[in-house]
Image (cartoon, grey):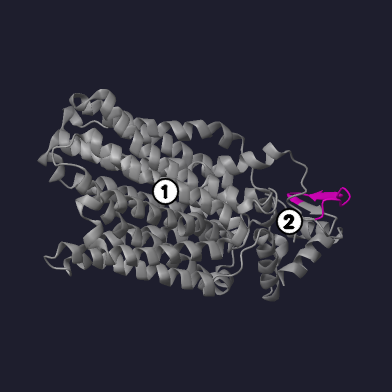
Amino acid sequence: MLGRNKTAPAAETESNGSDNYIQNVDVDPLAVIPKTRWERIWPALACGSGLFSDGYINNVIGQVSTILKKLYGDAYSKSAAQKNVSSLTFAGTVLGMLIFGYTSDKWSRSNSLLVSTIILIIFAALGAGAYGYHGSTQGLFAALTAYRFLVGIGIGGEYPAGSVACSEATGELKTGTRNRWFILFTNVMIDWGFVVGAFVPYLLVVICTEDHLRAAWRISLGLGVVPPLLLLWLRIKLKEPEEFKRESMKYVKIPYMLVFRYYGWRLFIVSLIWFIYDFSTYSFGIYGSAILTNVLPESAPLSQAFGWNVVLNLFYIPGAMLGSLFSDYAGPRYALATGVGIQGIVGFIMAGLYGTLSKASNVAGFTVVYGIFLSLGEFGPGDNIGLVASKTCATGVRGQYYAIAAAIGKIGAFVGTYIFPYIQAAGGDNEVSSAQYPFYVSSALCIFSAVLAIFCLPHIGQDTITTEDIKFRRYLESHGWDTNQMGLLKGESVEARAAGRDAVTNPVEEKLGEKAM
């Protein structure tokens, strides 16, 4: 295992441009770069933690929409705004993923992150202050919709730029802990964003009371500015990950045909698993609605409904936290398959017993079972799908690879919202069947995802980022592509890079190459 030799002598290094060649065959070349623990861990935190904003901004809009419906009645609920506020955020997120996936590979990981952070700050603030022309209600809705689309672009940028850079930064951390740190700074941040995004509107409705809901929804949206502002200084100081410096293709033409031939099937599998995960998540929400229906009377105040929503969102956290540890123990592939497989089994049980579980008298037990079910989703695919997407591809094209997989996942959520009402309708007038059918479909897809993960994904170890780069280099070289182009600095020639590499004996790369075979 790389990085296990604790008694190895200090490594000698020779720097050529952005390359660091470590003259010791028994150590991980990224792990021995002379840095303190904080110097290693803060870039991962700065890169990944911006996804807290994704969780907060996406979740808070549900409660804000409920407040707007209460304030404006049919003017909001019967307008296109209610649907567009959420759907255009989704569209902006997909667009942001694709744009920043490209810029993170061809421009800069750190600069792409900085731009996405600034977009989040600007349009989260504008959304909170949305105002129609001369106070027009429809103008307010139109402005809010436009700002939500633009803030979605910033959210989308956090996925490829942030998660990819975070995975590369964790490569410099202690082996055996890298998966958990990635998960803690990405998916766990998203989940806490969801919890806080549910809690803040609840708290503000309690403080402001239902007589001042306009202040509650604007403050709820405005607080979305705080997380990216807290990260802004760290991201200004952020430098490119060491692996990106060594392996990027930012100043050369990427051989996309070779990339597709090498990674096309793998990208299809990762994207399909992500699509299924987001596709299924919509139907799982049906059960949350059933719990709230049974717990709350029709006359329940808004604060009570929001409070129960916080409780439901808290169920994500235990699974995400435990899953981060299990991912290091079992590896992302088996951790994903274990979580999603058990979730599918529990889903079948819940669907079969829905008629009993959904009764008001059984709501406590139903809530506990549903909470376990949600935790399993985070334990498996929630924690590991981003890890899989960021570690099954070489550094030079990792941003675009991740962006495509994440965008297809988001499209899965959109398809789910469109298709599941038809699946529910197949149950006819029977309320139990209408709720069971989507869950049977989703649970079957969970089992299918587990099979795909086990049999179609490659092994993902602690040193996968390094070994994957070596295997990809060898593939490119076998097809006549000059890998001396990788990691070039601006204005640096291939000839100078090749001469520099030939002058250095690099047993580390040779040793790693043997491990990658």
Residue drawn 53% across the image and 75% down it: 455
Residue 457: % across, % down: 55, 70
Mark 1 vs 2, N-terminal side? 1
| Residue 430 visible, this angle | yes
Q: Label 1 belongs to which residue?
A: 316
Q: Crowdedness of circle 2 by 10 Å Cα count: few (<14), some, many (20+)?
A: few
Instruction: Confirm whether the magenta stretch covers residue 6.
Output: yes
Q: Please give left or right for residue 484 compared with residue 401 in the image.
A: right
Magenta part of the chain? 5-19
- Of 439 and 483, the residue lying toward us: 439
Mark 2, secondary structure of its residue: loop
Residue 127: % across, % down: 31, 35
Dominant SS in magenta = loop
Q: Can you tell which mark lies on residue 209?
A: none
Reply above or below: 18 against 25: above
- Of 468 and 462, the residue lying toward us: 462
Contact (CB < 8 A) between labels 1 and 2?
no
Residue type beneath disc 2:
Ser
- Of 249 and 317, the residue lying toward us: 317
Q: Please give left or right for residue 277 compared with residue 187 in the image.
A: left
Q: Please give left or right for residue 419 compared with residue 182 in the image.
A: left
Reply above or below: 227 against 392: above
Quadrant including the N terminus = bottom right
Q: Label 2 belongs to which residue?
A: 493
Q: CA distance from mark 1 to mark 2?
A: 50 Å
Residue drawn 48% across the image and 72% down it: 452
Residue type beneath disc 1:
Tyr
Reply above or below: 384 against 242: below
Q: Crowdedness of circle 1 by 10 Å Cα count: few (<14), some, many (20+)?
A: many
Residue 201: % across, % down: 30, 33
